[in-house]
């Protein structure tokens, strides 16, 4: 099954703001982001676990992380004017959902990208925030080519 | 990338209760269930939309739906003893995460199964609940063969 029909209106008249401020896309992207980050974090915790036992965890990604990643990836033009942290986070989620629905990236590829860029002691909150910000910046930088230029 | 290493402890000593009550699995499964249901619901709303415009939506699946589906699929042995609605929902999510991490089903296949079995007017809350219950019962019935027999 192919879900491109779910974004055909967005593809007809491609615009950064229309894609980046779409509420439905943001909701779908929220679930993608949380799933991918949960598995990526589980991957790293398991790899770093001395006794080699799997550690499975779920984690909602905070707004601050997504907002910082959007800015570092130079994609804040996709957000609405006078956006707050919540709006910026929604924009990240909308962009991720857009490229996934457009079949440009798979969930496993998103997980891989995050896993490759996550490092450090994820049990330390500050370390986790800074590592997750880098990982999401990398993810956004690598999907940038699938997004409209204006 | 393959995530089977994340469940190798569960596969070493397979048991219905150990898999069905794993909190980490439930967290990962929560994101899978919400993503899959959001896309499936968007698919149906778009198909039924008179003017043919895509409708994208996100939706957390309620506990009652997941609890009812677990019981209808005759999988409640996977839940803990004296489970409440919350525990039953967690068990559904754990089972979905388990088969996904075991590479037995993909996210797109989960979406397809839910989409095929969703019907009716999903804007009506009661109709949505009864349709979603059927859809999740079908999903669980079709992954049952990948789960341990005791």
Image: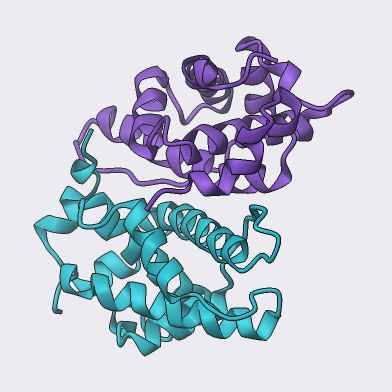
Chain colours: A cyan, B purple
Q: Nearer the viewer, residue A150 or A128?
A: A128
Residue A141 position within the rendered picture, expressed as x and y whole percent measured from the top left: 28, 78
Is residue A134 placed above or below A61 in the rendered structure?
below
Residue at image x 65%, y 10%? B74
Q: Quadrant for residue B12, please give it.
A: top right
* In this picture, residue A96 sits left or right of residue A12: right
Asked if one can make out residue B83 in the rendered structure from this viewpoint, the answer is yes
Q: Nearer the viewer, residue B136 or A114?
A: A114
Is residue B113 placed above or below B23 in the rendered structure?
above
* In this picture, residue B63 sits left or right of residue B108: right
Residue A59 position within the rendered picture, expressed as x and y whole percent measured from the top left: 62, 61
Residue at image x 34%, y 28%? B112
Residue B53 position within the rendered picture, expressed as x and y whole percent measured from the top left: 22, 42
Residue at image x 26%, y 50%? A101
* In this picture, residue B34 sits left or right of residue B105: right
Q: Nearer the viewer, residue B26 or B129?
A: B26
Q: Point out the image quarter for the N terminus of chain A.
A: top left
Residue at image x 66%, y 27%? B14
Is residue A43 placed above or below B69 in the rendered structure?
below
Is residue B95 placed above or below A137 in the rendered structure?
above
């Amino acid at each position: 099954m192919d879900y491109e029909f779910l974004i055909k209106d967005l593809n007809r008249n491609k615009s950064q703001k229309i894609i980046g401020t779409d509420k439905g896309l943001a909701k779908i992207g929220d679930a993608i982001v949380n799933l991918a980050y949960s598995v990526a974090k589980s991957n790293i915790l398991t790899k770093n676990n001395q006794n080699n036992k799997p550690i499975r965890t779920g984690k909602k990604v905070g707004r601050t992380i997504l907002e910082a990643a959007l800015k570092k990836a130079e994609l804040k033009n996709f957000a609405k004017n006078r956006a707050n942290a919540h709006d910026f986070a929604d924009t990240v989620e909308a962009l991720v959902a857009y490229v996934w629905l457009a079949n440009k990236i798979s969930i496993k590829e998103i997980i891989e990208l995050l896993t490759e860029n996550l490092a450090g002691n994820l049990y330390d909150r500050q370390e986790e925030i800074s590592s997750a910000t880098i990982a999401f910046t990398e993810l956004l930088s690598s999907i940038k080519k699938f997004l409209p230029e204006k």
